[in-house]
Amino acid sequence: MNPYDSQTGSPGFDSDSGFRTAATEEPSQPIKELVSEFLEQGRRLVRAEVRLARAEVRHELKKTTAGAGLTAGGGLVLLLGAFTFVAFLVIALAGVMPLWASALIVAVVLLAAGAGLTWFGLQRLKTIHGPTKTIQTLKEDSQWASRTMQSMKSQMHGHA
């Protein structure tokens, strides 16, 4: 019998029950080879997980950058607006009302505009999530590794 399963292409692997038993394979694959194969598959999985994590982090970083840029832009608009527009409006309104009232009106309008921009930036930042796909596949990989080790242990005890 060919040690490579035609469906999976993996030596010594049965898609129904995991590793083949001695009854289904001639001759049994040595434990050393099984452990070596297990470690190689583990390395491949780790590399794939790292690639997935990088892609997810890059995607979330783009959203973070956009949200932070909006928030910083809102803060800058608040500052610049406070320095220039305040002086102009306070002086302009001081001609038709007391100076303190004109200053109060201008301050409230600027604070409302800055708060609105900052709120939109913070809402954008709230859409950022962790690498959920990577976390899920890591859980699946952990379960696979556990099942594979259990299968190898049972084979070792069966051949001892």
Image (cartoon, grey):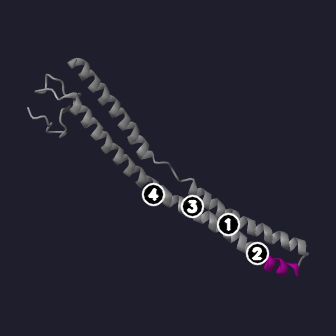
The numbered disc on residue 11 is: none
Q: Which residue is mark 4?
A: 58
Q: Which residue is mark 2?
A: 83
Q: Residues within 10 Å of mark 4 (few under 14, many from 20)?
A: few
Cα distance between the residues tagged 2 and 1? 13 Å
Determine whether, in the image, residue 123 is placed left or right of residue 97.
left
Rendering coords of residue 149 (x, y %):
31, 28
Region of the chain picked out in magenta, as a range: 85-95
Cα distance between the residues tagged 1 and 4? 25 Å
Q: Quadrant of the C terminus?
A: top left
Q: Which residue is mark 1?
A: 75
> In percent of the image, x 39 and y 49: which residue is there?
50
Cα distance between the residues tagged 2 and 4? 37 Å
Where disc 1 sits, the SS reads helix
Q: Amino acid at mark 3?
A: Gly
Residue 86 lies in the magenta-colored region: yes
